[in-house]
């Protein structure tokens, strides 16, 4: 774990119809990432969200176009036993 397991106390508050918590500066994530919340029993875990594969399809299409006409050298045919 990146941080020692030292408990921090903070308070919950209302933000509209949601409940919010202030995260102390030394535990805070960068503001430009998305996080996800997971309930585990009576705990709520905050963790960085899995990165989305946005753009992967386009990258694979570009790679496929670049591979057009490419043939793999298969060597001599070998029988498998």
Image (cartoon, rainbow, N blue to C red):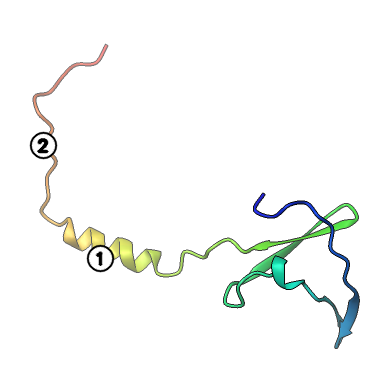
**Mark identifier at residue 13:** none
Cα–Cα span, label 2 and label 1: 22 Å
Estimate how packed mark 1 is, as few (under 14), some (14 to 19) or many (20 or more) residues with alpha carbons within 10 Å.
few
Q: Which residue corresponds to the image point at 58% horizontal and 61% vertical from the top-left?
A: 50
Estimate how packed mark 2 is, as few (under 14), some (14 to 19) or many (20 or more) residues with alpha carbons within 10 Å.
few
Residue 67 drawn at (x, y percent): 17, 55
Q: Is residue 79 above or below residue 37?
A: above
| Front-lying residue, 81 or 35 | 35
Q: Is residue 2 above or below residue 9?
A: above
Residue 39 in the figure: left or right of residue 32: right
Task: Specify the quadrant that holds the C terminus.
Answer: top left
**Total residue callouts:** 2
Residue 75 in the figure: left or right of residue 79: left
Residue 24 drawn at (x, y percent): 77, 71
Q: Which residue corresponds to the image point at 84% horizontal and 63% vertical from the top-left?
A: 8
> According to the image, label 1 marks what residue?
62
Q: Quadrant of residue 3?
A: bottom right
Between discs 2 and 1, the one toward the N terminus:
1
Q: Quadrant of residue 69?
A: bottom left
Q: Which residue corresponds to the image point at 10% horizontal and 36% vertical from the top-left?
A: 73
> According to the image, label 2 marks what residue?
73
Q: Secondary structure at mark 1?
A: helix
Return the residue found at the far top.
81
| Disc 2 to disc 1: CB gap under 8 Å | no
Q: Which residue corresponds to the image point at 15% horizontal and 19% vertical from the top-left?
A: 78
| Front-lying residue, 23 or 20 | 23
Residue 64 drawn at (x, y percent): 24, 59
Q: Is residue 39 above or below residue 35?
A: above
Q: Secondary structure at mark 2?
A: loop
């Amino acid at each position: 774990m990146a941080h020692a397991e030292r408990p921090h106390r903070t308070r919950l508050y209302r933000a509209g119809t949601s409940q919010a918590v202030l995260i102390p500066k030394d535990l805070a994530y960068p503001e430009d990432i998305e996080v996800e919340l997971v309930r585990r029993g009576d705990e709520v875990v905050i963790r960085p969200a899995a990165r989305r594969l946005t753009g992967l399809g386009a990258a694979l299409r570009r790679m496929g176009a670049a591979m057009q006409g490419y043939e793999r050298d298969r060597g001599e045919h070998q029988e498998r036993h």
